[in-house]
Structure formats: C-alpha cells, structure tokens
Image: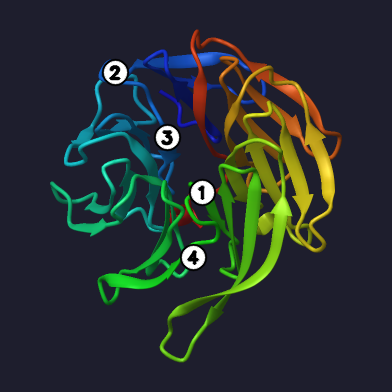
Amino acid sequence: MPHPSVVLATAGYDHTIKFWEATSGRCYRTLQYTDSQVNKLEVTPDKQYLAAAGNPHIRLYDVNSNHPQPVLSYESHLNNVTAVGFQCDGKWMYSGSEDGTVKIWDLRAPGCQREYESRAAVNTVVLHPNQTELISGDQNGNIRVWDLTTNSCSCELVPEVDTAVRSLTVMWDGSLVVAANNNGTCYVWRLLRGTQMMTNFEPLHKLQAHDKVVLKCLLSPEYCEPNKYLATTSSDHTVKIWNIFDFSLARTLKGHSRWVWDCVFSVDGAFLVTASSDTTARLWELSTGEAIRVYQGHHKATVCCALHDGTDPSAV
C-alpha cells in the first residue's frame, strides 16, 4: 500500500474510521471500530500510526497497511477517552478520560506509565511545546498543568466556576493558551516562564466566540506565520476564524447543518478540516471561507478528524 503524503481520517458514532484522499474526497479505507463510538483521532508525528480513542480504550492502527485490526490496544481507562496525542518524537502518547485521569503511555512498552488524577471528567488535554507539561481541562471548570519533570500538578486555575472547559489549545511557540467552555467563551492567556521554570498564566483576553457551546478551539500552526488564527467550532453549526493580534473575526465558515465537533489546520494554515454531527467532514479554504470538499460516507455523527500533511520529522 502506498504511503500517503497526506493522512486524513474521520470517525464518530457509526463505529467506523475512514481514510480519505484529501483532494478528490474519495474514501480509500474503512476500519471497523466495533467496541464503541470514536471520540478522538490523532496521527503519530511519523505518519505511521493512527490513534483512535473510544470508550474506554485507545486503539493504534497502522496507517500504511490494509490490516483491519489494531496494532496495539491501551486498556486502563474506565470511561470515555476524550483526548489523545503524541510527544513530538512519537515516543509516548498521552490521554484524558471521563474517568477523571490523565495518562501517559510509552509506545515501546505495555501498559500505562503514569497517571494523574483530575478529580473530575477530563474533556481535553494538550501537550505544551516544551514537551514537559500537559495541560488538562475538566467538566468542573478546572485547568491543571501537569509537570512531567516533577511528576506533579504545578498550576491550577478556574476561569469560570462550574463551567466545563471543553477544549484547550497552545500556540506552537508556547506563548499563548486558549480555553473554550460550555458558555461559548474563550479565555486567552499569555504563558510566562517563572523563575522556577514553572508556567504562569497571564490573562490576555476574554472572547465571546459563540452564543452556544464551543466544542473545539485550535490555534494555527507555525507555518501559518506571520498570520496567527484561532479556530472555534460550535454547537451553533458554525466555525469561526479569529485574528489573534486583535481577536477580530476574520471568517465565519457556514455549511454544516449540525454541531461541529472537531477541526484541524493544514500544516501551512491555509486550510481547515472540520467534522460534524451532520455526518460529513469538510475541507475549507480559509482565504475565501468556502468549503472546497465535502467528505461523505459516515451514516451517523462524525465527531473527530485527524490530518497530517506535513513532513515526517525523521526524514528531515
């Protein structure tokens, strides 16, 4: 099977994972995920594997094979896995779950290596670009920084009491973090390094992005520079693109007919892929705000998407 230069995958509530040719919109591979719905997808940095987070497991599939079974399964969560991601070299994976834990998994060894207790259902986890801190957001409205060097919670804040933190995103250079909540609000902080090498949050902006729930917030990647954008997806069926320099609205992407759960930028920040309860995923050209491709094939809500169109870091 040829190694695709662009890995684009979607999944959701129909118990399938679909791989797409990004430009043509053709689905070239469908995997059955029989155990549960799929909540999150993430491609490893080397484009070799796709992690699919379900309830309560994580399955790892070979991207470049037609083999229908997962290569590995990660089993110790007790409830929906809501977040999954990889360290930059692909040596370890992190996850968050509604069981209230954040876990770290060494991809070269069986079982979970570390576990952090959030004491509330975890909705979102992101890895700081320094690769030594995980930031989690939970159903009770807590944001916590987990210091992987000291193996402890180094920072805790609550932007809005009793309002679930739905999504977190960190700027590629570690300068900003954004948290989106169930009230449609995005809180933006500058991340500052203190004398103890501990990350401090300096409030920068409060953005009322949507009137309904923000389901995903995502900052644009490095190669989008000098432009800096924040994408927000919502239960109001829209996606909004915000300019970071003044938090003005650059574009509203309209076309989905139900909740928009997930989004991912292309490596150059020129395109955005979105996944929606209307069963479709869409590819948007951000310069025009037009959906230039619709990926149709799922027959229930599509709630997650993964895109890797960059270079394999090991090949550089």
Mark 3, residue position:
40
Mark nearer the N terminus (4 vs 1):
4
Labelled pair 1, 3 in contact (Cβ < 8 Å): no
Q: Quadrant of residue 77?
A: top left
Mark 4, residue position:
129
The residue shown at (45%, 23%) is 11
> Horizontally, is 86 left or right of 207 in the view?
left
Mark nearer the N terminus (4 vs 2):
2
Give x and y (percent) for residue 219: 64, 53
Is disc 4 surrounded by few (<14), some (14 to 19) or many (20+) residues within 10 Å? some
- For mark 4, give the secondary structure: loop
- For mark 2, give the secondary structure: loop
> Horizontally, is 197 left or right of 6 in the view?
left
Mark 2, residue position:
68
- Residue type marked 1: Thr
Tell me, for residue 70, which label it has, or none: none
Q: Is residue 282 above or below residue 156?
A: above
Give x and y (percent) for residue 13: 42, 17
Between 8 and 256, the residue placed more toward the observer is 256
Alpha carbon separation for disc pair 4 and 2: 33 Å
Between 303 and 224, the residue placed more toward the observer is 303
Q: Is residue 283 above or below residue 316?
A: above
